[in-house]
């Protein structure tokens, strides 16, 4: 009986030893698996962090539109649209000088900002923008003194990948210049003006500088308030001249388009 008990005890000890070995082996396996999982997770985290850093770098690497504004100027207006037909949204910046000597007193003694304005056209690229054309002082101040009449209101528009410089003059009509990008600049390819006296249309001038043709539509009944508008068109062939470049226009106020020389 005692011998049986000894045998039983021995068997129990062996069983416990085997169980302990299995537990140790399993524990080592679990530890190895856990370490492998942690290592894999760290690799994934590191990869995500690197991707995040790259995204941040790409964003930081892109130039902001304000980076293109020269010293002594501020952003006045921003217009967006595709100007070179590449499907990307380009950017037009209207800038304004901040010179101290650009301020003056008006007839009422108020301090008025007469600093001139300019334009910068930026083309979109994969990592930011590049300058397509710039002209820092071609527009007068928005506070220009119009004398007896109020000064025309300048606005910039993008239509059909063309750049329009538009001047609205209230009841007196409007005029606008059409530019298209070619030969590394924006060329003046069209002009249109419409004159009115309140509700009465006086006439319209349209010029296509590519074809060299000017159309004058005159309302022959413009002085008769009771008569209906009647337009008579005159077609004028212009002398061939090089297209004007946006970058080379000193002052839009001095563009005397309607005084261009014509052939008889």
Image (cartoon, grey):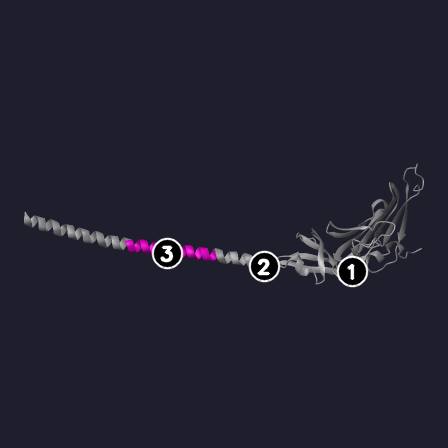
Q: Report helix, strand or loop for mark 2.
A: helix
Image spot of residue 30 (x, y percent): 31, 53
- Alpha carbons under labels 1 and 2: distance apart: 35 Å
- Pair 1/2: label in front: 1
Image spot of residue 7 (x, y percent): 10, 50
Q: Report helix, strand or loop for mark 1.
A: helix
Image spot of residue 62 (x, y percent): 61, 59
Magenta segment? 27-47
Image disc number at residue 102: 1
Of all residues shown, which one is farthest toward the left? Answer: 1
Task: Please report whichever mark, 2 or 3, sits nearer to the chain's N-terminal start.
Answer: 3
Q: Is residue 28 shown in magenta?
A: yes
Q: Residues within 10 Å of mark 3 (few under 14, many from 20)?
A: few
User: Which quadrant holds the C terminus?
Assistant: bottom right
Find disc 2 in the rendering and name its residue. 60
Find disc 3 in the rendering and name its residue. 36
- Alpha carbons under labels 1 and 3: distance apart: 70 Å
Chief secondary structure of the magenta portion: helix
Between 235 and 139, which is closer to the camera in this rendering? Answer: 139
Q: Is residue 32 shown in magenta?
A: yes
Task: Please report whichever mark, 1 or 3, sits nearer to the chain's N-terminal start.
Answer: 3
Image spot of residue 10 (x, y percent): 12, 52
Residue drawn at point x = 35 percent, y = 54 percent: 34
- Pair 1/3: label in front: 1
Q: Residues within 10 Å of mark 2 (few under 14, many from 20)?
A: few
Of all residues shown, which one is farthest toward the top? Answer: 226
Mark 2 touching mark 3, by CB under 8 A? no
Image disc number at residue 75: none
Q: Report helix, strand or loop for mark 3.
A: helix
In the rendered structure, the answer to whether residue 9 lies left or right of residue 211 reads left
Residue drawn at point x = 24 percent, y = 53 percent: 22
């Amino acid at each position: 009986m005692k011998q049986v008990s000894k045998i039983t005890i021995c068997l129990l000890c062996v069983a416990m030893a085997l169980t302990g070995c299995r537990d140790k082996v399993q524990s080592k396996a679990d530890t190895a698996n856990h370490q492998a999982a942690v290592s894999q997770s760290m690799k994934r985290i590191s990869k995500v962090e690197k991707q995040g850093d790259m995204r941040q770098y790409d964003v930081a690497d892109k130039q902001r539109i304000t980076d293109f504004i020269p010293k002594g100027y501020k952003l006045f207006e921003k217009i967006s649209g595709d100007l070179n037909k590449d499907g990307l949204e380009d950017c037009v910046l209207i800038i304004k000088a901040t010179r101290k000597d650009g301020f003056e007193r008006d007839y009422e003694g108020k301090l008025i900002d007469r600093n001139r304005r300019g334009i910068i056209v930026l083309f979109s690229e994969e990592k930011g923008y590049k300058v397509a054309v710039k002209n820092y002082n071609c527009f007068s101040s928005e506070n220009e003194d119009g004398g007896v009449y109020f000064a025309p209101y300048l606005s910039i528009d993008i239509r059909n990948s063309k750049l329009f410089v538009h001047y609205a003059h209230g009841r007196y009509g409007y005029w606008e210049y059409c530019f298209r990008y070619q030969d590394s600049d924006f060329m003046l390819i069209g002009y249109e003006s419409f004159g009115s006296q309140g509700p009465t249309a006086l006439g319209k001038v349209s010029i296509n500088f590519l074809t060299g043709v000017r159309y004058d539509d005159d309302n022959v009944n413009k002085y008769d308030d009771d008569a209906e508008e009647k337009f008579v068109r005159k077609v004028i062939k212009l002398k061939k001249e090089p297209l004007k470049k946006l970058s080379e226009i000193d002052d839009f106020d001095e563009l005397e388009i309607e005084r261009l020389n014509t052939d008889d």
